[in-house]
Structure formats: C-alpha cells, structure tokens
C-alpha cells in the first residue's frame, strides 16, 4: 500500500508467458460513490503508463482481474492501482493506492 486509504489491502500481479497480466487482491476497502478501482501498467518505453482496465471488486474486497497486455512498450516495470472516477480514466488522475515494481 502506498496510501493510507488502501487500508490493509494486499495484492500480487503476475505477467504470464502469453502476455496476460493477472491481479489478485484482497481487503480492498469500499470506495466512495462515483469512484472505481483502475489498474495501470508502467513500462520502460512508450507508452510508459497505460490502463489495464477498471477492476471489479466483490463485496469482500477481493479481486481477480486478468487482462491481455502484450509486449508493446517493452517489459512491464511496475503496476499501480488507483481510485478513479466511475468508469475509469484515460490518464491516471486518482490516488495511487497500491504500487508494486518488478524485480
């Protein structure tokens, strides 16, 4: 967690051999009305930051989100989960609640 608003949330993200990014998270707190969670991938090359979609969170604060990210822009160096306006954003403008870099 990077922001106290993330509470005790924890997450893991994996990039599979076929180019899918899989996010598993738990204990995500409910967001205020008019907000949603959105996943972002950060790459070394252009596009440096790209949306990996709006994330659906169940009533227990759990997520299992898979999205095809491919190789455009080079290797993924980090992922971030933000709170954005309902429906998501074209560019990240929300609070960075969770962030993780690759090793």
Image (cartoon, grey):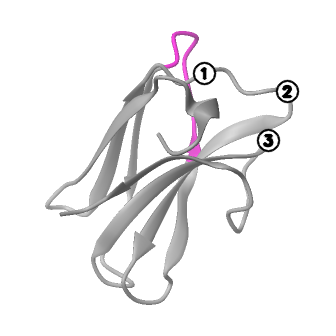
The residue where tag 2 is placed is 33
Q: Is residue 36 left or right of residue 75?
A: right
Indicate whether residue 1 is drawn in magenta. no
Q: Residue furthest bottom?
A: 46
Tell me the CA gap for discs 1 and 2: 13 Å
Labels 1 and 2 touching (C-beta < 8 A): no
For the residue carrying disc 3, how many other residues have a C-alpha within 10 Å: few (<14), some (14-19), or many (20+)?
A: some
Q: Name the foreground residue: 68 vs 78.
A: 78
Name which residue lies at 70% across and 38% down: 36
Label drawn at residue 9: none
Tell me the CA gap for discs 3 and 2: 8 Å
Q: Secondary structure at mark 1?
A: loop
Q: Is residue 78 left or right of residue 90?
A: left
Q: Residue furthest top?
A: 60
Q: Is residue 102 left or right of residue 57?
A: left
Mark whose residue sits in front, 1 or 2: 1
> Quadrant location of the C terminus?
bottom left
Q: Secondary structure at mark 2?
A: loop
Q: Is residue 13 left or right of residue 28?
A: left
Q: Which residues are magenta?
A: 54-61
Name the image quarter holding residue 62. Answer: top left
Name the image quarter holding residue 90. Answer: bottom right
The answer to whether one can see residue 83 in this image is: yes
The residue where tag 1 is placed is 29
The residue where tag 3 is placed is 86
Name the image quarter holding residue 73. Answer: bottom left
The image shows a total of numbered marks equal to 3
């Amino acid at each position: 967690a990077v922001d106290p608003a993330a509470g005790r949330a924890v997450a893991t993200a994996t990039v599979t051999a076929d180019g899918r990014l899989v996010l598993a998270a738990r204990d995500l707190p409910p967001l205020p009305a008019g907000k949603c969670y959105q996943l972002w991938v950060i790459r070394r090359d252009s596009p440096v930051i790209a949306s990996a979609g709006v994330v659906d969170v169940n009533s227990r604060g759990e997520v299992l989100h898979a999205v095809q990210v491919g190789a455009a822009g080079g290797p993924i160096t980090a992922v971030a989960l933000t709170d954005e306006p309902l429906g998501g954003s074209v560019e990240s403008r929300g609070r960075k609640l969770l962030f993780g870099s690759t090793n």
